[in-house]
Amino acid sequence: MKKIHEIKEISFTDSTMKIIIDGKEYEYDLAQISPRLAFASQSDQQNYDISPSGYGIHWPSIDEDLSIDGLLGITHKPPRRRKKLIHK
């Protein structure tokens, strides 16, 4: 499976989440990215699973998911639709 992102070292303070993505450190305000994480206990915050491809992070005890592309502000365009050829 191809890795989309390499995710390492997720840590929390009272109001922020720090995460290393693809070798760069990012810090996010929990209230802005996830009210569920902001109000979760420390043990719930530390109970996460990183997808094998590095696509996202899941917190099972609070049923929360964050996509790494979303955190980084990466958007993807939908694939172009091919026009159907009409044969006569």
Image: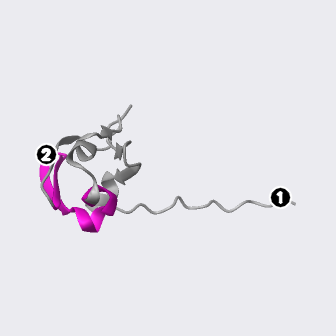
Q: Is residue 33 magenta?
A: yes
Depth check, front residue: 83 or 58: 58
Q: Residue at point 16% right, 62% down?
A: 15
Q: Please tell me the numbered disc located at residue 42.
A: none
The quadrant of the picture occupied by the N terminus is top left
Instruction: State whether residue 37 appears in this view.
Output: yes
**Badge 2: residue crowd in 10 Å (few <14, some 14–19, many ≥20):** few
Q: Residue at point 28% right, 39% down?
A: 47
Q: CA distance from mark 1 to mark 2?
A: 52 Å
Outermost residue toward the front? 41
Q: Secondary structure at mark 1?
A: loop
Q: Residue at point 15% right, 56% down?
A: 26
Coloring scheme used:
one colour
Q: Secondary structure at mark 2?
A: loop
Q: Residue at point 74% right, 60% down?
A: 85
Which residue type carries mark 2?
Answer: Gly
The picture places residue 10, in percent across and down from the top left corner, at: 18, 45
The picture places residue 8, in percent across and down from the top left corner, at: 18, 40
- Which residue is the site of mark 1? 87
**Badge 1: residue crowd in 10 Å (few <14, some 14–19, many ≥20):** few
Q: Which residues are magenta?
A: 15-38
Instruction: State whether residue 73 appears in this view.
Output: no
| Camera-nearest label, 1 or 2 | 2
- Which residue is the site of mark 2? 23
Q: Quadrant of residue 23?
A: top left
The picture places residue 58, in percent across and down from the top left corner, at: 36, 44
Which residue type carries mark 1?
Answer: His
Outermost residue toward the top? 1
